[in-house]
Amino acid sequence: MWRTGRQDHDRSMPHAPDPRGATPKLCSLQSAVGRVEACPGEPCPFWEPGGAVVDPGCAVERLGLAAELDSRPGLAEYLLEVRARLERVRDSTEEREVRSRFYRLLNEGEEAEVA
C-alpha cells in the first residue's frame, strides 16, 4: 500500500507521486463507489499491521471482499460507513459494537455463499 511515511499525509492529492516514483495505491472501497482516494494505510480501521509472518495490508483485500464489491453494490457503502464509525469511536465498547456489526455482515455473506 502507498505510504508516505507520515501518518498525516495529504489525502486531498490521491494522485500525488510518491517521492520514490511509485504510483499510490487506491482505496478499494472508494473505487467501488466511483470515488478516488489514496489508500490511507495505517490510519484506516481496516488496515492490519502485519507481524512476523504477514505483511501489513488491507483487511478488505485480504478477505477477498474487493472482488465482491462489483456484485454487491451496497457492500462498499456499508463498509465505508463502518470505516467512518470506527474512525469516530470514542471508547472500546463502541469500537467492539461497530466491529461486531462488520463481522456479522461477513458471516452472513459466507452463509449465503454456502447455501
Image (tube, grey):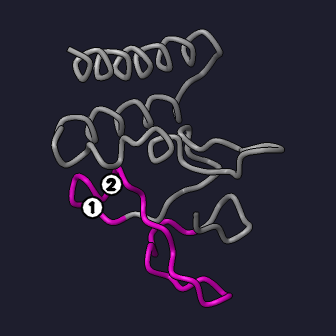
x 55%, y 69%: residue: 10
Label 2 CA crowd tier, 10 Å (few <14, some 14–19, many 20+): some
Amino acid at pointer 1: Arg
Residue 8 sits in quarter: bottom right
SS for dot 1: loop
Q: Quick check: 91 left or right of 73?
A: right
Query: Is residue 22 on the magenta stretch?
Result: yes
Residue 71: x percent and y percent? 16, 43
Amino acid at pointer 2: Gln
Furthest-bottom residue in view? Answer: 21
**Residue carrying label 1:** 35
SS for dot 2: helix
Say if 95 sits above or below 37 in the image.
above
The dominant secondary structure in magenta is loop
Residue 32: x percent and y percent? 25, 53
x 66%, y 87%: residue: 19
